[in-house]
Image (cartoon, coloured by chain):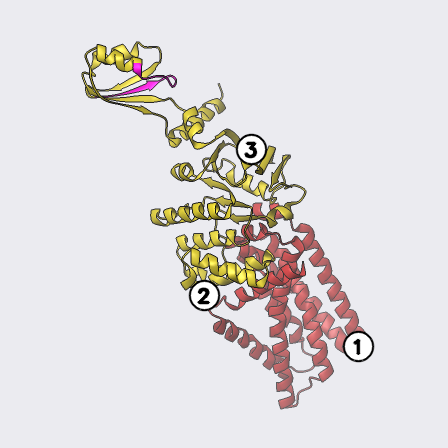
């Protein structure tokens, strides 16, 4: 199962990086949000709505709509479903690919933000940087699980993106509230928020797995 | 000893609400043969393939592919089959090599064997020079070839091909057909092929089934299917074949109809029978016969005959 999930993730990551026509363009296209969000993180005043909370939501949901809806739209879904890969492997592979992509950009942004904060003497403590790395990973998984769930039944990528756009609002609020509460509540509060968000991601993944029916995916 | 069976369906049925897409479908495909599944659009061909791949659950009945129960062990069936479905299913942003690499990995081929097989197939299909090209820039013919390479990659026992030459220009279609024929002989695959192209079916297939409205109308080899549908006939050329000769022929019980003129007659027979009495009748009537040719219905005529009969049967009385 892990091997198949890895294979699906490998393919989806390659497709993501090549979606602008070449690997170089894909990398350059990824660097732009890293620099923009990194700059924002580095100079963000304390007490403002934390940029880091919506970083993974924006970055992951921007690509995850493509998951199954993209396969359906480009007529690759049926051939993929005709392979021996298990339902869980296909789902997990997609989630890993989008988390890998979105979280890498988050980590890049955080690194750039930490460097800028150090350069301008802003308040971005190393322990908060470490927490943000863990926090963005969990929110990336949550967003990817939600995105894959929506993308499973969406007819087109655009329809999936539209639904995700609506669902992003409560997701942003939850992530923002969790990040803000964590800063005030310290290490224990941080750990609790990560566990809660991770649990929510697990629930969404389980729901997606429950809704994964090869026949329904084709007929939809 | 009977030949092993690669695909067996027994009373297979699939219903979507009120629509019966596949109805009581029973067939057997011997291993190592190319089996053509013919039918008009919406006849149930694609649904049948999806049922045989375990992608859809049947409403009733059962099927086995490569000796494995599809309903119970769909994943095992998919491990032993290759597919080229209605769309080639290739990832257009990826290169030809990466497309094959992806599927080779999903079929758990060892890295060295995978690389060797990909190279072999790309060379075989004349695509080796374009292996690093993004597939999105390719013609439909090239994509179909790559799709066929992907279907053959892991050496499947059974290949499911859903109209593989549809939309190809004649040259590309002939090339793909030749590749298919050669590879299935060399590598001993069983092929389940749906097609609209009756000429293709006749050239490639050892067995055929005609399906319409989800029901099998006829099965058999192309020859028996042709002979079993429509009427045999004679084409007579010569002179003195005018109204008088035609009237004599029409009086014969074995003759269904006669068309033509002084120099050429097309005689439709009620059943296959010796042409000698009819020729003798014409000669005794003063005709000068140059040539007598027996005709049997083409596969296309047999196919249309079956569909028309089904249409008439389906119409309310």
Left or right, residue A190 beside residue B257: right
Residue B269 sits inside the magenta stretch = yes
Identified at 55% across, 54% down, the residue is B154
Up the image or down, B231 lies above or below A16; here it is: above
Frontmost of labels 1 and 3 is 3
Q: Chain letter for mark 2, please.
A: B
- The residue indicated by pointer 1 is A187
For the image, the number of numbered tags is 3
Q: Is residue B262 left or right of residue B101?
A: left
Which of these two is toward me, B125 or B171?
A: B125
- Element marked by disc 3: strand
Q: Which mark is residue B27?
A: 3
Residue at the right extreme? A188
Q: Which residues are magenta?
A: B264-276
Q: Which chain is red?
A: A
Q: Are marks 2 and 3 in contact (CB under 8 Å)?
A: no
Chain to which mark 1 belongs: A
């Amino acid at each position: 199962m892990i091997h198949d999930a890895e294979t699906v993730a490998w393919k989806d990551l390659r497709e993501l990086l090549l979606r602008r026509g070449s690997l170089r363009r894909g990398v350059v296209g990824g660097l732009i949000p890293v620099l923009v969000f990194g700059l924002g993180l580095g100079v963000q005043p304390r007490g403002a709505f934390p940029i880091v909370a919506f970083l993974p939501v924006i970055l992951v949901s921007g690509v995850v709509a493509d998951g199954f809806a993209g396969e359906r739209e480009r007529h690759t879904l049926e051939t993929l479903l005709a392979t021996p890969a298990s339902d869980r492997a296909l789902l997990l592979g997609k989630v890993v690919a989008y988390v890998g992509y979105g979280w890498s950009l988050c980590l890049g942004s955080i690194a750039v933000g930490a460097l800028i904060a150090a350069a301008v003497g802003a308040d971005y403590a190393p322990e908060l940087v470490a927490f943000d790395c863990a926090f963005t990973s969990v929110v990336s998984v949550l967003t990817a699980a939600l995105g894959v769930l929506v993308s499973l039944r969406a007819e087109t990528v655009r329809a999936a993106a539209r639904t995700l756009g609506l669902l992003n609002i409560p997701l942003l609020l939850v992530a923002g509230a969790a990040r803000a509460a964590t800063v005030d509540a310290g290490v224990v509060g941080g750990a609790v928020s990560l566990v809660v968000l991770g649990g929510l991601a697990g629930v969404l993944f389980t729901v997606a797995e429950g809704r994964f029916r090869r026949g329904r995916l084709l007929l939809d | 000893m009977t030949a092993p069976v690669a695909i067996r369906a027994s009373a297979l049925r699939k219903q979507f609400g009120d629509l019966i897409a596949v109805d009581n479908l029973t067939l057997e495909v011997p291993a190592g043969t190319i089996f053509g599944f013919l039918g008009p659009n919406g006849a149930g061909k694609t649904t049948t393939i999806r049922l045989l791949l375990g992608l859809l659950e049947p409403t009733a009945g059962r099927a086995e592919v490569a000796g494995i129960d599809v309903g119970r062990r769909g994943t095992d069936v998919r491990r032993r089959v290759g597919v080229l479905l209605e769309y080639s299913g290739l990832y257009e942003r990826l290169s030809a090599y990466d497309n094959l690499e992806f599927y080779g990995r999903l079929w758990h081929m060892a890295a060295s064997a995978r690389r060797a097989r990909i190279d072999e197939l790309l060379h075989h299909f004349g695509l080796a020079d374009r292996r690093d090209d993004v597939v999105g820039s390719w013609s439909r013919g090239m994509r179909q070839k790559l799709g066929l390479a992907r279907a053959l990659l892991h050496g499947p026992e059974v290949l499911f091909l859903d109209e593989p030459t549809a939309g190809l220009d004649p040259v590309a279609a002939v090339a793909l057909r030749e590749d298919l024929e050669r590879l299935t002989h060399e590598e001993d695959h069983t092929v389940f092929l749906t097609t609209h192209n009756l000429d293709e079916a006749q050239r490639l297939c050892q067995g055929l089934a005609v399906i319409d409205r989800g029901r099998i109308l006829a099965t058999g080899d192309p020859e028996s299917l042709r002979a079993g549908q429509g009427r045999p006939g004679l084409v007579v050329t010569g002179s003195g074949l005018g109204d008088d000769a035609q009237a004599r022929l029409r009086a014969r019980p074995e003759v269904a109809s006669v068309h033509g003129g002084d120099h050429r007659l097309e005689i439709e027979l009620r059943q296959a029978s010796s042409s000698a009495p009819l020729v003798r009748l014409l000669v005794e009537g003063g005709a000068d016969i140059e040539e007598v040719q027996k005709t049997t219905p083409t596969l296309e005529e047999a196919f249309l005959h079956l569909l028309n009969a089904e249409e008439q049967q389906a119409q309310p009385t």
